[in-house]
Amino acid sequence: MKENQVTILCAERLAPPAGLLMRILRRVDLEKARHIVRRALLAWSCVAAVATAGLATAGIFFYKEAATSGLGTYLNQFWALASTNPSLLLAHLSEILTSIGESLPATTLAVAAVAIGVVLWSAEKVIGFSKRYTRVAY
């Protein structure tokens, strides 16, 4: 009988504390949630980095095409006319704007606009996921 009592006493000493299993399972679920948010944050950070590089490239191409198309000359003449004779500017505004529009590099402007949109969208996602990451508590 004594031997049986010793076995029971040892088994009681080795039993885990109450609620330990539930705390372990909660911690595992928390780590899964943090892992999902971490992966999304990494993915959107990569998208933001690539979009920023694309925006810089589109900006460089826009600058080069604007320099070769004479857009700067039209804009300088527009501002000179606006400061010296605004009434003449208003009388010929449609022709002036048409000339500026024809010299504008539309393709690179569209690519730059798309790149700006993707940069802003991915930055919003990165900010949102970083806030969600800090909300997932330890």
Image (cartoon, rainbow, N blue to C red):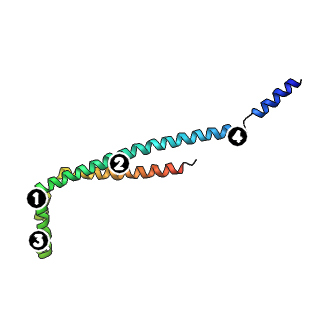
| Mark-to-mark CA distance, 3 and 2 | 45 Å
Query: Which SS class for mark 2?
Result: helix
Q: Amino acid at mark 3?
A: Ala
Q: Which residue is mark 4?
A: 19
Residue 123: % across, % down: 38, 52
| Mark-to-mark CA distance, 4 and 1 | 75 Å
Compare marks 2 and 1 and give the one earlier in the sequence: 2
Residue 40: % across, % down: 44, 43
* The disc label shown at residue 126, or none: none
Frontmost of labels 4 and 3 is 4
Q: Amino acid at mark 4?
A: Gly
* The disc label shown at residue 48, or none: 2
Q: Which residue is mark 3?
A: 91
- Kindly identify the residue that appears in the image at 24 percent across and 49 percent down: 57
- Kindly identify the residue that appears in the image at 75 percent across and 32 percent down: 14
Q: Amino acid at mark 1?
A: Gly
Query: Which SS class for mark 1?
Result: loop
Tell whether label 2 touches label 3 (CB within 8 Å).
no
